Amino acid sequence: MNTRTRAAALFAAGAIAFSAAPRFPAVYPPRNDVKVDHLVPVPMRDGVTLYADVYRPAKEGKYPVLVSRTPYGTERFPKAYDEPLFFAQRGYAFVYQDVRGRHESEGKWEPFRDDINDGYDTVEWAAKQPWSTGKVGMQGHSYGGHVQWRAAMAKPPHLTTIFPLVASTSLYHNWITLNGAWRLAFNFGWGPVRQESRIMQNTGIHGGKEAPESQRYGPVVRSLPLIAMQELLGRHARFYTDWVRHPDYDEYWKAIDVEEVFDQIEIPVHTHGGWFDLFLQGTLNGYTGIAKRAGPRRAHLVVGPWEHGVSRKTGDLDFGPDALVEREVFELRWYDYWLKGIDNGLASDPPVKLFVMGRNQWRAETEYPLARTQYRKLYLTSGGHANTSAGDGALSWDVPAAASPDDRYTYDPANPVPSTGGNNCCGVPTLSGPRDQRPIDNRQDVLVYTSKVLTRELEVTGPVKVVLHAASDAPDTDFVAKLIDVFPDGRAIALCEGILRARYREGTSRPRLLEPGKSYELGIDLVGTSNVFLPGHRIRVDVTSSHFPQFDRNPNTGAPFGMGAEIRKARQTIHHSAEKASHVLLPVIP
């Protein structure tokens, strides 16, 4: 069975896995020869002209339109034109446009800022062309996914649907930061570094994979202050400086935040992403934000065991052949229904398709998070020596004893815990995806809490949260938590992770420094996962204070973000008594 046929089976109502009997056909073959018009001018309201290539069926007529807007050139994506050709061969006009200030288009590029008006103007231009039916959808991934949300914010009358793939919905909350902690590897690597192809080629950065010359970035990403880091590479990106100068969720970010206006977006939306993608939070929030208003018919979601693109092997795990789903399977069916009016059964499909790791199977659901979820607390406990995997840290379903010794460690920004897996992409090379944590679990600044060996399956699907009762002798610091599946052979594979910058414990718009030595309840959002912990496996939670260079090192000083070079050590305390019961809140599926 090929991947398209396997994918078709997913849409069977109530399907448990791709092996279920398919009830609708795989992607149909090409039906049209294609003509291409290059460098088609698209005027914007302020007089700037953006340019696009327009792919459409060679036969004259009117066709629904897909608009894809990108800042990238073919030197980064040599297969970039496969998608326009794919859809034009199947009866769509495809407008493939350079965003403002990039490649052929006029104007000055400032990431995201002009995409609301430019998206609106491009959609309305496309609707009025002689080859257009007037129905316009949008297509694209990553930046090309986010600009779909930006256009939807403007509510162009002819925008009928969007399909953002691996895309952010809040540039502050699920692009620039996670819970206020700055995504250094991505912000620096994608930002001032990767937007110049010459620099990218000369320094060995290639699509988020480990690069042979990545050691060149050791001194750069460790340099302080952050505000001056890009100058070490001769870069002077204004937007990077602006990002550093706006570490809080303020009006600078709110003006371009889609999540602020979810209740105003009325068109159907299909989100698509991976459990290990940098923008997983955007994929999930996009679905839940639209479904809450519009209902399951107009909001669909697909999440696979992937990073920033579809693959069978992600990180250290091979998820099997069913993980290889071609995203066009979902896109074409969605567009055919909403833009062509084809009754292809989409209306009766379960709106949510999740890949359940551990079993390595797809499952269709009627909502996310799942209504049948039982949220259960798994408590952190120890005899006071949870440091390293050889320590006495444990996880228990029972509330800790009234008096239980604390765990302590020292976080030194000069010697941070190296990033080993996680949700990352497209920036300074780091190991990403589901990775074995054993290379770092012998560090004294990593607390390890492990359950007993499981005797039966435990499925965890949905949002995951770690609640720490913690204290620090520093005025500001970070806390990192990871949910880990420990295999019988000893592999400790991280499934999801979160980080909290302590000054944002009351919200990212309300920074508050810590009172040194005072205990606080800190909620760390690990975003989400879907995994079956199999018999013979163990559940594990790691706690530490750094994840570098995926996230910047908190200097522990409480000084204004990104402006200083001073660092200091922080002595951290984790409580787990009956009164201060640190725990992981698991979404257990019966």
Image: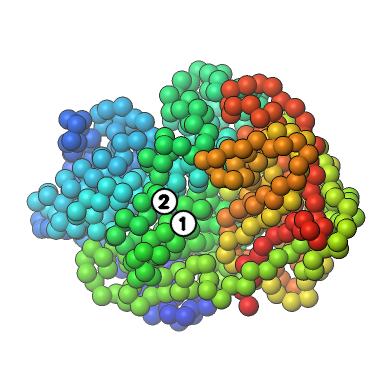
**Rendered position, 320 above or below 24:** above
Horizontal and vertical percent position of residue 194: 47, 31
At 69% across and 22% down in the image, what residue appears?
Answer: 566
User: Pointer 2: what residue?
Assistant: 259
Task: Judge whether residue 309 can be spotted in this image.
Answer: no
Mark 2 or mark 1: which is in front?
Answer: 2
At 62% across and 45% down in the image, what residue appears?
Answer: 505
Of helix, strand and loop, which one carries label 1?
helix
Horizontal and vertical percent position of residue 420: 68, 45
Horizontal and vertical percent position of residue 502: 65, 41
Tell me, yes or no, whether the two marked residues, 2 and 1, touch with CB atoms within 8 Å.
Answer: yes
At 76% across and 42% down in the image, what residue appears?
Answer: 518
**Type of amino acid at the residue the image marks with label 1:** Asn
Horizontal relation, residue 260 to residue 61: left or right: right
**Type of amino acid at the residue the image marks with label 2:** Glu
Horizontal relation, residue 228 to residue 131: left or right: right
* Location of the C terminus (image quadrant): bottom right
Horizontal relation, residue 74 to residue 490: left or right: left
Q: Which mark is residue 285?
A: 1
Disc 2 crowd rating (10 Å Cα; few below 14, some 14-19, many 20+) is: many
Q: Residue 310 carries which label?
A: none
Please tell me which residue lies in front, 21 or 137.
137
At 19% across and 31% down in the image, what residue appears?
Answer: 46
Query: What is the distance, in whole Å, between disc 2 and disc 1 at their CAs?
Result: 8 Å
